[in-house]
């Protein structure tokens, strides 16, 4: 099943073009990794999928992005509803400087997903459990989220993202600020989350892409050079540039 | 070669030493000025917190007061105290002639009649009896007692006569002169008589002005800052506005006073000399200060927090109201307090809108005429009477205390409530 279909997407920052003619299909309930040297436009593409580029004044996006066959670049698309369905986890953990509970309950609150305090408690608990954080924090839900370790903060951000049951989760280098143990925990988590969510992850670590993803897209200088199953990209790429990048000859 | 290097090094050390010395002497100078200033103010001002009383025996003679037998409260209220008051003072010197009796009367404040009346109102059973009553000494004798009065001047250059000094010294020798904490300095309004003048009216005037200023400037400035920082597109027009806000912060305050005079008083016909007009005028001055502080603290909220909220599906409005604004509040509030502290010390614009008028009532609302603390300092400093000299310093002390408290408060808010980012 195709969940997201990008068709001829061009992105400009002012006059400078950052993405050229990207077309890419994303499979439902699988992990798609986006790799490539830094500055090639991976984050830019990811941010197209939940229209976070709207926030940047000078940024303009052209082309179609179909999610469930609906073009999110269409005028009739409501970004609030869109972002409820497409969650995002950022490179640097960015919990709100509020309590753990408030962090996780924020999304459900603004989208009116709980009728009672009890329902909200349940949402918070399941989200934290799914993010594999519940055991560590269940006694300190009302302490500030910024008091956690880096890895815990990132899992809190994941819990916050899944609290509104998004169909898709976008992750922009979620482990780049974490140590190897925290990274391993998050990778394990991603594998678990793909049962219920479609996941797109940007990573600068080839090994991580190979471990967690089923599909991989390779970006270079704003172009999608090659994409396909992770197995194929890593073992037998068609393009020599991909080959060079995978084997560490540049990047 | 090696020697040359050593010389260079030595030179560098010396230069550094010299520079440190310059810096230290600059700080020393600044501290010296500050100490001299504070010492001067305290040494001239502290005596204003003391007030001198003459203890005078008063005989509550019903006949002289024109009181019938068993008078009611109203009768006591309406009785005539002038005669017994005069008599009590004259009795201080049984041999006094008429001129001297007049001089005796002027040893206490003109308020003495009322002080005697209050004594009787408190205790009606005093009728027909004699009691020692505390009467406020005249401002000149007050200064004499405090040692601020040059007694050795020739008599015709003094406002106290030799005769008054002689009687006063007798009273002092008999322990009939006492100095007590001067409550009336805080509870009385301004007065032409230094011994009765207090800061209540100007203090309340300042409080009302600051409140009006806060109520106007704070919401307007915060809304403007939020709009400019979070919603307005970045273009030529907003740049232009930004430049002008910064310009507004640099406009001399007297210009705002003229604006208040020309617009608020002349066009809108608001009541003159009132804290309402003063507060509005001051709010124009405070506005840019608060806008700049609020924008700076909105800017200091990391963009990652906004991104987090937006990515959760919060609208721009929700992101601003739920996250950015609360996080920026400590900075905004401390900026506001500092802006208000500036406004509190402002004199020129208030003089222009008439808050310099003599006000001998305590204002009950921002619509009543009032002075303000800095203007009160100006008014008293202009007065010729010796009794006002210490009042000026005392008023400065109150104003400084007020300002230091506000700034301290701003610091506390800044340190205590500012969030640390992850
Ligand atoms: N906010 C922005 N304003 C202007 N240019 C930007 C902005 N964000 C990214 N770019 C440019 O777009 C290109 C792609 O950036 P990005 O998507 O962040 O790359 P990656 O995530 O692959 O490292 C880069 O050349 C970068 O300089
Ligand atoms: Mg990136």
Image: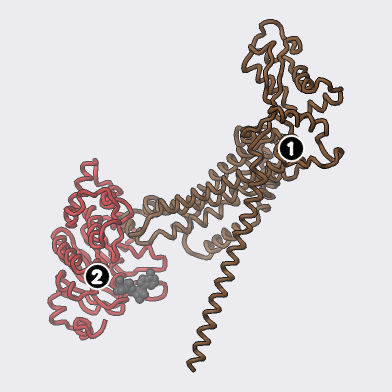
Q: Nearer the viewer, residue B146 or B86?
A: B146
Q: Is residue B283 above or below residue B142?
A: below
**Chain containing the residue with disc 1:** B
Residue B114 occupies quadrant: top right
Element at badge 1? helix
x%, y% of residue B361? 67, 32
Q: Quadrant of the C terminus of chain B?
A: bottom left
Q: Which chain is red?
A: A
Q: CA distance from mark 1 to mark 2?
A: 86 Å
Disc 1: which residue: B144
Q: Please indicate whether residue B318 sits to the left or right of residue B111 in the image.
A: left
Q: Is mark 2 within 8 Å of ligand 2?
A: yes
How many discs mark residues in the rendered view? 2
Q: Please indicate whether residue A167 sits to the left or right of residue B63 in the image.
A: left
Which residue is at the far front?
B173
Looking at the image, which residue is at 61% across and 45% down?
B397
**Chain containing the residue with disc 2:** A
Hue used for the chain lettered B: brown
Q: Please indicate whether residue B337 sits to the left or right of residue B274 in the image.
A: left
x%, y% of residue B163? 82, 30
Specify few, some or many for label 2: CA neighbours under 10 Å numbering under 14, 14-19, or 20 or more. many
x%, y% of residue A153? 26, 59
Q: Quadrant of ligand 2?
A: bottom left
Specify few, some or many for label 1: CA neighbours under 10 Å numbering under 14, 14-19, or 20 or more. some
x%, y% of residue B66? 75, 10
Looking at the image, which residue is at 71% across and 18% down?
B58
User: Can residue B136 be seen in the rendering of this structure?
Assistant: yes
User: Can residue A12 be seen in the rendering of this structure?
Assistant: no
Q: Is residue B289 above or below residue B236?
A: above
Disc 2: which residue: A202
Element at badge 2? strand
Looking at the image, which residue is at 42% across and 72% down?
A14
């Amino acid at each position: 099943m195709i969940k997201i279909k990008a068709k001829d997407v061009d992105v400009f920052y002012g006059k400078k073009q950052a993405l050229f003619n990207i077309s890419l299909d994303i499979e439902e309930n699988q992990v798609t990794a986006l790799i490539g040297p830094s500055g090639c436009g991976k984050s830019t593409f990811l941010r197209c999928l939940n229209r976070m580029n709207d926030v940047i004044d000078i940024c303009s996006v052209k082309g179609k992005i179909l999610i469930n066959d609906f073009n999110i670049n269409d005028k009739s698309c409501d970004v609030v509803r869109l972002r409820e369905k497409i969650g995002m986890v950022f490179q640097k953990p960015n919990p709100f400087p509020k309590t753990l509970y408030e962090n996780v309950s924020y999304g459900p609150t603004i989208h009116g997903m709980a009728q009672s305090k009890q329902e909200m408690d349940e949402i918070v608990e399941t989200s934290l459990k799914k993010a594999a954080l519940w055991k560590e924090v269940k006694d300190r839900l009302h302490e500030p989220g910024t008091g956690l370790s880096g890895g815990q903060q990132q899992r809190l951000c994941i819990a916050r993202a899944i609290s509104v049951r998004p169909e898709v989760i976008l992750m922009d280098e979620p482990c780049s600020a974490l140590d190897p143990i925290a990274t391993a925990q998050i990778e394990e988590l991603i594998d678990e989350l793909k049962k219920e969510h479609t996941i797109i992850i940007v990573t600068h670590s080839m090994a991580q892409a190979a471990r967690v993803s089923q599909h991989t897209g390779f970006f270079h200088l704003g172009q999608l050079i090659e994409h396909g199953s992770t197995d194929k990209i890593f073992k037998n790429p068609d393009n020599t540039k991909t080959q060079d990048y995978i084997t560490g000859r540049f990047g | 070669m090696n020697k040359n290097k050593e010389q260079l090094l030595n030179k560098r050390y010396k230069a550094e030493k010299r520079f440190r010395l310059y810096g230290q002497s600059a700080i020393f100078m600044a501290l010296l000025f500050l100490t001299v200033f504070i010492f001067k103010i305290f040494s001239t001002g502290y005596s204003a917190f003391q007030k001198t009383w003459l203890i005078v025996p008063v005989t509550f003679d019903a006949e002289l007061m024109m009181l019938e037998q068993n008078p009611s409260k109203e009768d006591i209220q309406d009785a005539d105290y002038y005669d017994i008051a005069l008599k009590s003072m004259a009795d201080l010197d049984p041999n006094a002639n008429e001129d001297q009796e007049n001089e005796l009367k002027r040893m206490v404040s003109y308020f003495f009649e009322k002080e005697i009346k209050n004594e009787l109102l408190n205790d009606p059973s005093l009728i027909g009896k004699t009691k020692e009553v505390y009467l406020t000494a005249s401002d000149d004798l007050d200064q004499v007692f405090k040692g601020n009065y040059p007694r050795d001047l020739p008599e015709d250059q003094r406002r106290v006569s030799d005769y008054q000094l002689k009687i006063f010294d007798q009273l002092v020798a008999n322990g009939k002169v006492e100095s007590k904490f001067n409550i009336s300095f805080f509870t009385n309004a301004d007065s032409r008589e230094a011994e009765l003048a207090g800061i209540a009216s100007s203090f309340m005037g300042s409080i009302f002005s600051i409140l009006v200023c806060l109520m106007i400037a704070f919401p307007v400035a915060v809304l403007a800052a939020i709009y400019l920082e979070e919603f307005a597109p970045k273009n030529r027009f907003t740049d232009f506005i930004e430049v002008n806000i910064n310009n507004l912060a640099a406009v001399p305050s007297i210009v705002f006073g003229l604006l208040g005079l020309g617009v608020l008083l002349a066009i809108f016909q608001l009541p003159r000399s009132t804290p309402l007009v003063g507060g509005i005028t001051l709010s124009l001055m405070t506005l840019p200060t608060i806008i700049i502080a609020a924008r700076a603290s909105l800017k200091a909220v990391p963009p990652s927090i906004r991104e987090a909220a937006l990515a959760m599906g919060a609208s721009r409005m929700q992101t601003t109201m739920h996250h950015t604004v609360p996080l920026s509040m400590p900075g905004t509030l401390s900026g506001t307090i500092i802006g208000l502290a500036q406004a509190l010390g402002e004199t020129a614009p208030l003089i222009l809108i008439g808050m310099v008028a003599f006000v001998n009532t305590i204002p009950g609302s921002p619509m009543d005429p009032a002075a303000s603390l800095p203007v009160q300092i100006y008014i008293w400093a202009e007065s010729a009477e010796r009794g006002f000299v210490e009042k000026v310093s005392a008023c400065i002390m109150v104003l400084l205390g007020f300002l230091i408290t506000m700034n301290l408060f701003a610091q506390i808010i800044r340190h205590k409530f500012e969030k640390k980012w992850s």
